[in-house]
Image (cartoon, coloured by chain):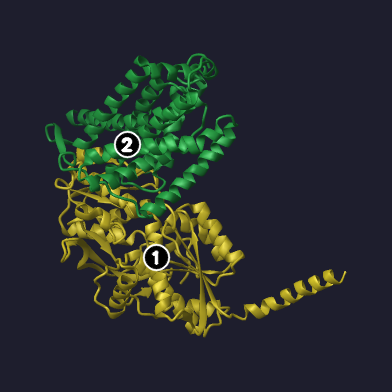
Chain colours: A yellow, B green
Amino acid sequence: MNKIFAAAAGALTACVSVPALAQQKSVKIGFVSTFSGPSAVIGNDMRNSFDLALDHLGRKMGGLPVEIIYEDDQQKPEVGKQKTEKLIESDHVDFIAGYIWSNVLLASLKPAIDSKTIVVSANAGPSQIAGELCSPYFFSTSWQNDQTPAAVGLYMNQKGVRNAYLVGPNYAAGKDMLAGVKATFKGKIVGEDYTRWPDQLDFSAELSKVRAARPDAVFVFYPGAAGVQFLNQYAQAGLKNQIPLYTAFTIDETTLPRQGENALGIPGAQQWVNDLPNDANKKFVADYKAKYKSSPSFYGAQSYDAANLVNSAVVAVKGDVAKKVDMIKAMEKADFASIRGPYRYGNNHFPIQSFYLQDVVKGLDGIPVLKTVATIVKDDQDGFHDKCAMK
Amino acid sequence: MRDEVILLVEQCLNGLQFGLLLFLLAAGLTLVFGIMNLVNLAHGSFYMLGAYFAATFAPLTGSFVLGAALALAATLVVGMAVELIAIRKLYGRDHLDHVLGTFGLILFFNELVRLVWGPGGMNLPLPPYLGTSIEIFTDVHYPVYRIAIIAVALVVALLLYLAVMRTRVGMLIRAGASNREMVGALGINIQLLYTLVFGVGAALAGLAGLIQAPILTAQIGMGENILIVALVVIIIGGIGSIRGAFIAAIFVGLVDTVGRAFLPELFRLAMTPAAASALAPALSSMLIYVLMAVVLVLRPQGLFPVDGK
C-alpha cells in the first residue's frame, strides 16, 4: 500500500515539476533532414554545418545550452510528418529546422504551425508556403523554389538562347523549378518533361526526345544523386558537346566529386557559393574544411544560417523562448551575419536576396570546383509574396 | 515525318535496353520462385552488390571488362553463400516467412554496403570505347554503351536458353519447376541444384546491377525499386517461366519507355497543355501496373504458365 502511495506521490511531484522544467534550462531544436539512402550525403552536410554553427556559438544561445535532436525523414513526406509530430509532441522542441524536400516540408508544415512551433526551412521553398500557406511561424534561410531557376532563365536570355527544353522531376519542387524558368525566360519552350520522382534514374527516353527536338539549350533540375546520373547520361548520349545545359540545384559540392568532368562548364545559379568573399563565409568554409575534410555545399550554408537565425531570436528574448511573438519579430529583421551576405525578409518570411552565376572550373589541382562568375540579379523577391495574407 | 520515325526507333531501342535489363533480373527471380517456391525479396540486393563489386574491381584491375567479370564471380559466390547460410532454413516454411526473412536480408545488405563502401554511392566510369556515342542515323547519335547492353543481354538470354533447354542441369531445372518432389524422389541432389540455381540467379542480378552502374551509379537501396518492376515482369510472364520472363520483360520495358515518351504528346492532342503535363507523367508511371492488372484479369497464370503446377 505504501508503495502505491509513494508511486502516486512521485507521479504527482513529476507533474508539479513540469512547469519548473519549462522554465527553460536549454533551447531545444529539432532538425529534420534525410540521413539514409542516396540523399544522406545532403543531410550529413546540413547536420555538419548546423553543428559547426553551434560550435561557433559556443553551444549556447542567449546563455542557455542548446539541445539538438536530428531526425531522418527518409526523403518521404509521410515519414517527415511523423518525425515532425514526434519532435513537437514528445520532445517539445522550441524550433524545428532542416527540410531538404518541398513535398516533405509541405506535409510537415501544418502540425508545426498548429502547435505554434517556429519552423526554419534550410532548403525547401515551395511556392505554396510563399503564397497562400504562409505563416508567421515559418521562416526560410534558403529561397523560394522559383527564384533560382528564374535567375537561370535571365542568364539564358543574356546568352541569347532562343528556345529551350526543360526537364525536371515530377514533384512539388520540380514543378516550381520549371515554372521559375518559364517566368523569366523569353524564348520558346520546345518541350517539357516531368520524370517519376525519386525512383526514375534512367533518362534515356527524355534524352532521346531532347535530341529530336534540337533545342538551343536544355534546362534541368535534378538535386542530389539524380544530378550525378543525369549529367553522366547527358555526356554518354553525346549531348554535352551538342546542346548547352543550364541547371538549378544539380551541381553542388555534394555531387561535384562524382560528376567530375561531366560538370565542367555547366552554369547554374545560387544565392551562396563557397567563394563569396565576406568574412563570415570565409570562416565557415575554412572551419568546415578543417573539421570535416570536405567542402560545404549550399545546403550546409543555409543550415549554418538557420542556426544563426534561431540564435538571433533566442538572444533577442534573452533565452525566454516562450515569447514567440517577440522572437518572430526579431527573426524578421534577419539580424545576423548571413554567410551569403546581408539579406532582408519579405512579408512571407522568404529572403529578398541576390543570385549569382556559378560555373564549374578546374581548380588548382585539376579537380573541378564551383566558382562565382557574376551577379545575375540583385535583391530578388519571389513572385508569390503578394498572395500571402501577412503584411 | 522522318524525325518522328527516328524518335520512335530510338525510343524502342531505349525500351528494349530497359526490357533486357529487367530480364536479367527477372530470370533469376522467376527460377528461384519456380523451382524452390521461394519468394526472394533480397534479389535486388544482389543487383546492388553487382554494381558495388564492379565499381570496386574495375579501378583495381584497371579494366572495365575484367572488373565486371570479377564482380560477376563475386556475386555468384555471395549468392551461393547466402543460400547455404540463410535461405536453406526457409524452404519448408510459409511464404510469409520467406518475405520476412529475405526482407531482413535487404536490411542486412544495405547496412553492410554502408559499412564497407560508405553512404555516398560509387561511380563506375566507362572506358573511352564504351563512353561515346555512334551515329545510328544521319545526325542521330546513340550511346555505344546502351547498344553494348542490348548485345550482352541478348547473348546471356541465348546462353540461358541453351543451358535450360539443351543441358542436363537445365533439364533438372525444368523438371524442378514442374514437380519438385518428383525430382527429389528420383535421387537428384536437390540441395546442390538449389544452391546452384540461387547462385546463378544472384549472378544474373549482379550482372544487371553492374551493367546499370555506369548509367545510374551504385547506390544503397538501388535494388528495391527495380525489384518491384521485376516482380511485375514475372507475374505477367508466368512464374517459373524463363521464356515468359523474357517476353514480358521486353514488353514491360517497351510499354514503360515508349509510354513515358509519347503519352504527354498524345494527351496534348485531347486536352490543354497544363492538364496534359499534369496527368501524363502520373499515368505513364502507372502503365506497367495497369498492364499487369489486365494480364491478371485475362490470364491469371501469366502469359506463359509453367505446365504441371
Q: Position of residue B97 (x, y in %)?
A: 58, 36
Mark 2, residues whose alpha carbon is within 10 Å: few (<14), some, or many (≥20)?
A: many
Q: Could one spot residue A337 in this view of the protein?
A: yes
The three-letter code of the residue at mark 1 reads: Met
Give the secondary structure at mark 1: helix
Residue at mark 2: chain? B
Q: Position of residue B249 (x, y in %)?
A: 37, 27
Is the C-beta separation of discs 1 and 2 under 8 Å? no
Q: Position of residue A120 (x, y in %)?
A: 46, 68
Can you tell which mark lies on residue A166? none
Residue at mark 1: chain? A
The three-letter code of the residue at mark 2 reads: Leu
The answer for how far apart the CA atoms under marks 1 and 2 are is 37 Å
Residue situated in front as seen by the camera: A316 or B78: B78
Can you tell which mark lies on residue A46? 1
Q: Give the quarter of the image for residue B155.
A: top left
User: In screen coordinates, is B53 left or right of A99?
Assistant: left
Residue situated in front as seen by the camera: A135 or B205: B205
Q: In this view, does A7 lie above or below A124?
A: below
